[in-house]
Amino acid sequence: MSEHAPTRHPSIVVHYLGRIERIVLSLIAFVLVILALLLLVSSVIAMIQAALAGNVRDGAIDILDGVLLVMMTMEIVYTVTLSLQSHKLVAEPFLIIGIIAAIRRTLVITAESTKLELTNPDAFRSTLMELGLLAFIVAIMAGSIFVMRRSEQIQLDPAEEKLLDD
């Protein structure tokens, strides 16, 4: 009986740590969903106010920024949900979140850079460098997603491998 005691104790600890992890991840997902809903309502209200005031063009970047933030938040919820279901950390949703974040920043910079071009040429050059870096980051993340998906397609099941060997 003493042989089983040491192996039983760590499994109980692991079991309860797993439960605690699921509870914490569920609470995080719940908070993120509420945050996303509040951000979405705020963006809709801002859009309605801009439409009523006749200045949708002026508020469009802020509205788009808010909606993309909601998308990022929901992608994080999706990633947390995947972690809860599979008990694994999956990289692709994080890459998608990174792409959305980079695109969001690119849109905001683009909208604000038109003012910098005339008033502050040095800041404008820095902004162009940041845009180039963001484009590079998006390309690297998209390439990573492509490679990950391609490597999943390349992996063959044993029956297909046997057919190829024959």
Image (cartoon, rainbow, N blue to C red):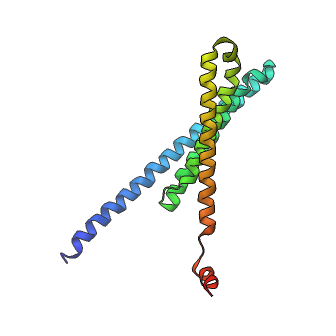
**Residue 22 in view here:** yes
Identify the image quadrant of the N terminus: bottom left
103 versus 8 height, above or below: above
Locate residue 114, reporting x and y percent.
Answer: 71, 20
Q: Nearer the viewer, residue 99 or 16?
A: 99
Whether residue 38 is visible here, answered yes or no, is no
Determine the residue positioned at 53% across, 45% down.
30
Residue at the farthest bottom position:
166
| Quadrant in the rendering for residue 127 | top right
Quadrant assignment, res 99: top right
Instruction: Spot the residue most to the left.
Output: 2
Task: Looking at the picture, tell me which residue is in the foreground, 5 or 63.
Answer: 63
Does residue 88 lie above or below 141 as drawn? below
Give the percent coordinates (x, y) of residue 137.
59, 41
User: In front here: 45 or 66?
Assistant: 66
Residue at 50% x, 57% y: name it: 84
Task: Single out the residue that lies furthest toward the top.
Answer: 119
Residue 82 screen position, x and y as percent: 54, 56
Quarter of the picture holding the C terminus? bottom right
Residue 65 position within the rendered picture, expressed as x and y whole percent measured from the top left: 66, 31
Residue at horizontal 18%, vertical 75%?
2
Q: In this view, does 77 lie to the left or right of 49?
A: left
Left or right position of 115 against 123 = right
Marks counted in the figure total 0
Q: Quadrant of residue 108?
A: top right
